[in-house]
Every structure is written in C-alpha cells, then in structure tokens.
Amino acid sequence: MTTKMRSEIAEQPAALRATLDALLPRTGEVERLAGQTRQLLFIARGTSDNAAVYGRYLAEAHTGRLSTLAAPSIATTYRRRLDLDGVLAVALSQSGRTEEIVETLAWAKDCGARTVAITNGGERSPLAQAADLALCTVAGEEKAVPATKTYTTQLAALAVLALGLGADVDPGDLRRVPDAVEKLVGDPGDLEAIVEGLADKPGVVVSGRGLAFSTALELALKLKEACYLHAMGLSYADLLHGPIAVVDADTPAILVAAGEGPTLAGTVALAERVTGAGASAYTVGGGTALSSVSTAALNGPDLPEWVAPLGLIVPGQLLTEALARRLGIDPDAPRGLNKVTQTE
Ligand code: AGP
C-alpha cells in the first residue's frame, strides 16, 4: 500500500514548480516592503521552525542581515513589548492557523516590525490576513501528519524572500530545483541499507552545518515523529562540544551536506571521526567526497549550496517513510499528533 506521506513526497516537484511560478514574480513586492529593513525575526513552530532556520542562515550568509528565531513566549506569555523598528518579522505556518504564531506576528507588527507570512493555508488564512504581505505556497492539501511538500515549498518561499532582499546569488538556480528533486525521488541512494541499520537502534544523531543545519533538524524531527526514534538534530559544531560522546556502535550518525560549499570538508572529517569511533556514519549529499567515507549513502541534489536544502531533505523523507513501515508504524498518522497543534 502506498502511504499518503509517500505520495506527498512524490508530489514535491510539481508543488515546487507551482510555488515558484506563483512567488518568483513577487520579489519586487518583497523588495518594496522590506528592502530597507536591517534585521529579520522568524516566527514558527515544528517543521516550520526548521524551515525558519534555513531562512535565518540564508538571510545572514547571503543578504548580510542579522537574523534570529523568535521566542513566542515573550509575546504570548510574558507579554513584553520589544522595539522592532527596522525589523522584518517573517511568520511561517503550513496551516496558517496555529494561534500562537498568528498572535506573535500581530505582536511583532504592534512592536513596529514589517511583517510577512509564509503559509500553505491560503490568502484567507488567519496568518495571511495578519501580515503586510503573504507569500502563499502552492503545495495543495497535505494529508499525512508529517510535513513534506509544505516544508520544501516553504523553503522555496524563503529563497524568493532572500531574492527580494537582494541576496548575492543567481536567481536562475531556483528554477533547477524541481528537476533535482524529481531525480532524488526516483533515485534516493542506499535507502534499504540505512533502514536496516536504524531498525534496531534506540537513537541516532543527525548533523549538518550552516545552511544544511536546517536539514539535519528537520530529518531528526521526521524520524522522531514518524519512527519514534530518539533522533537528536545538531549543528556539527555543537555536536563536537559534547553530544559526540553518545555516538557509538548503538547510536549511529546521519551527516548532511551540500555537494559544494564551505561546510563540506568539515562534514567529511566528522564522518571519519564517527566511523573511527566504531559507529556507522550514514550520509546525505556531499557528493563523492562524503559518500566515499560513509557506511551507506543517500544521494543529494546537484544544486548550489544556497538552494541545496530544498533537495537534501527529500531522501531523508523517503528514509523516514520506509523506516516507519519497516517498524510497523503508519507514517500518515503517528501517535498523539494532529495536523494543527495549539500550544495552550
Ligand atoms: C510536521 O511534520 C509536524 N507534524 C509539525 O511540525 C507541524 O508541521 C506543525 O505543528 C504544523 O504547524 P504549522 O501549521 O503552524 O506549520
């Protein structure tokens, strides 16, 4: 039986094409609203928060703007005003209906920020209505609880946002993404070996650096929610400051990197350190430099580093879906989770 999650993973090339068609012509609107802002504040939860990590690294590495993730409790629990003059607040929510996110965006506007919503919930969703500008993704309805196509289309919207903010990248790279994702759906690499390698393990560490850190966080969340695996998502810098101690024969590592860029060499060195400690080092992307030092490898997209996260998560989604089925779990409806979560 094909799961909804598997079908939705395969729908990503079409969802990305439709989203780019809708949003790329709107970079001028982003520029007019936000061109003069100096800092970015991302507001999100769950998978949307992992997308925000991509947005944060993209904004800092390619537009030179200081960026951070909001703590919504400052707005909704402590109810403290901050001076957000000159700040662009970007709220991400697949549903556009997570109350905490809508409330925090309204707080940011009240504190002086300009506001953007990125949502698959449509122009009439509460989040889109609360923002100065809504960038609506065109992923279609997502039925499986684990987010897949709504996540990658959020990344596409963030890439468009970065273009509107004057990012020092080639906009043409974005148009290559749907084909690269299609290729990965058809040929994700050594999925079966990694499914078997993880099936009897109590936990796993998932790590990446820079722009690929977002992929590591998102893959760890997928493995937790759909496979009930204790998956720790970490930047590899943080991993080296302590958590590497848990990596051993019972706790493998999954290491993620783009096929080019400044974080690849460090990820290769980390894979060698993991296997040197007697643990399995499974890899995602990183070209032959990384796959040649791995225990088993998933393929990455043939894309420049700045857009690689739009493809890097795809083999991880397929791994999650296959591992869930191998463990006898229905990935479409993990225990205790709903499509929309309210914090309080
Ligand atoms: C996704 O795999 C998770 N189930 C979770 O993060 C989910 O994406 C989130 O709770 C949805 O909230 P949102 O609609 O505000 O993005």
Image (spheres, rainbow, N blue to C red):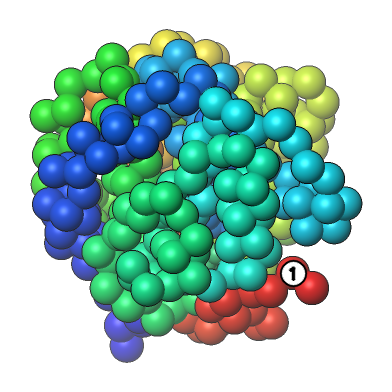
Q: Quadrant of the C terminus?
A: bottom right
Nearer the observer, 271 or 300: 300
Residue 279, above or below 95: above
**In the figure, is residue 272 to the left or right of 167?**
right
Residue 211, quarter of picture: top left
Mark 1 residue type: Thr
> Where does the image place residue 207, in percent across and percent down from the top left?
58, 34
Nearer the observer, 8 or 47: 47
> Where does the image place residue 149, in percent across and percent down from the top left?
33, 62
In what quadrant does ligand 1 lie? bottom right
**In the figure, is residue 180 to the left or right of 252?**
left
**In the figure, is residue 105 to the left or right of 37?**
right
Q: In which quarter of the image is the N terminus?
A: bottom left
- Residue that appears at 45% across and 14% down: 64
Label 1: which residue? 343
> Where does the image place residue 250, in percent across and percent down from the top left?
72, 47
- Residue that appears at 59% across and 62% down: 102
